[in-house]
Amino acid sequence: MTNDLENRAIAILKANDRGGYTVPTAGLYPYQWNWDSAFAALGFATFDRDRAWREIETLFDGQWEDGMVPHIIFRKNDPGYFPGPDIWGSRTEPPTSGHSQPPVVASVARWLVETGGREDERRAHEMFPKLMAWHEWWHCYRDPDETGLVGIVHPWESGRDNCPDWDIGMNNIVVPDDLGTYHRRDTDWVDPSERPTQETYDRYLTIVKFGRECGWDHDIVVREGPFFMADPCVQFVLMRADRDLMALAERFDDARARGRIADWVARDEAGAQAMWSDEACGFVATDLRTGSKSPAITNASMLAFYGGAGTEEQRAEMVRHAREILDGCRYVFPSWDPRHEGFEQRRYWRGPVWSVMNWMMAAGFERHGLADLAMRVRRDTLAMVRQSGFFEYFDPLTGEGLGGPNFTWTAAIHLALVSEHGAAEVA
Ligand code: GLC
C-alpha cells in the first residue's frame, strides 16, 4: 500500500517534469514556480539526485542581475494561465514574474550536501554565489532600512497567496479605473469557492500593474507600491536559510561570505521580534506601512521554531497555541486559526493544510525537542495523502483533497517524509 503510494508520487514528479524543471500541476500552474522547485528537489533526491539538482539549477536560470530569484519563470507561453508574461512585463530572458517567493533553496542545498556525496558538494559550491546574491537581495532590497525584518510587495511573494494575513494590507489598495478587464484562468480549473474572490483578484492585479509601470524597480515598489507587509513565512524561512547558507560557507571555507551572513543572522532575530503581537500572543504578519498586525496565528507563525526565532517565553506561548489548534483539528496544521473568525476550511490559505508548510514546521518542532508535535504533523501529512491522494492542499476537518490534483510538492514531501522517517514510524 505504502509502496504503491510512493510509486505514484514518483510517477507524479515524472509526469510534471517539463525537461529539467517541473510544473506544480498540469493545467492550473503550467510554469516553473520558485519554492515549488525547492521542495520538488527534496522529492527527486529520494530517487534521482542529479535530477534534484537540475530542478534548482534551472530555477536559477531565471535569476535577475540584481540577485532576485522570481516566483514564476515563464519558459513558454501558456494561454491557460493568467496573469502570464505580458501582464508581468519583466523584460528579462526568460520572462519571469516581478517579485520573489520564500527562499527555501539554501536549506534544500544544505540538506542535499549533508545527505549526499562529493557530487552534491560540487554542485552546491557552484550554486553558492547565486544563493549569496539572492539572500543579499532580500536583505538589501526588501529591508532597505536594515531593520532585520524583510517585507513582501505582493501576497503572492509570501507563497500564502490568499491568507487573511494580507487583508489589512490589501484593504488599503485602491483599484484604479484603468485596471482593464481580464479573464481569470484559475477558476476554469478549480471551484471558485476554493479560490480568491474577484475583489481580491483586482487588488492583486493592481500591484502587478504598479510594478510593471515602474519597470519593477524594487526601491520604488518597496517605498511607494500599493502593498508592503512582513510575512512570518518569508522571515522564518530566510532565517533558517541564512543559517544553512552559513553552514555551507563554513564547509567551503569562505571567510568573506561568513562575515556577510553573520550580519544577516544577527539582524534576523530583531526582525522576528517586530512581528510579535501581544494581542495574538504570537508572531503574526505585520503591515509595514501602517504598523497594524494580523489578528491570528497561522501555519506560518508556527515556523518560528523552524527559523529558530523567539525567546523561551514566546516559544512557550506558541506551543500553547499549537496544542490547542491540534486538539481542534482532525488534520493539522491549518493555514488560519480555526478558533478565529475568518477560518474557511476549504478556501485557499484561509484554513486548509499544506504539506510543504508541515514539512518545515515538523523540522522546527523537532529541533526544539517537541517530538510529539513533530510526529503529529508528519503523521497527518501522510494520512491526508493516503485518504485523498496528492492534492494541492487539504481540508483540516475532513482531510478531503482540494485545489489541483497530482501536485508536485505534495508528492515530493510524501517521498521526503517516508525516506527520512520511514512510513511505519509516522503511520
Ligand atoms: C499557489 C500557492 C503558491 C505556489 C503556487 C504554485 O500560488 O499559493 O505558494 O507556489 O500556487 O504551486
Image (cartoon, rainbow, N blue to C red):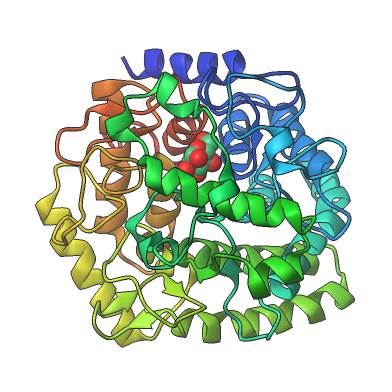
Q: Residue at x 86, y 46 (%)?
A: 122
User: Does residue 120 appear in the picture of this structure?
Assistant: yes
**Quadrant housing residue 18:** top right
Spot occupied by residue 106 in the image (x, y as percentages of width and height):
68, 55
Q: Is residue 375 above or below residue 197?
A: below
Total marks placed: 0
**Quadrant housing residue 258:** bottom right
User: Does residue 100 appear in the picture of this structure?
Assistant: no
Question: Viewer-proximal residue, 304 or 101?
Answer: 101
Whether residue 117 sits left or right of residue 422 in the image: it is right
Question: Viewer-proximal residue, 413 or 227?
Answer: 227
Spot occupied by residue 427 in the image (x, y as percentages of width and height):
26, 33
Q: Is residue 101 above or below residue 194?
A: below
Whether residue 86 sits left or right of residue 227 in the image: it is right
Whether residue 268 sits left or right of residue 330 in the image: it is right
Q: Residue at x 26, y 67 (%)?
A: 296
**Quadrant housing residue 410:** top left
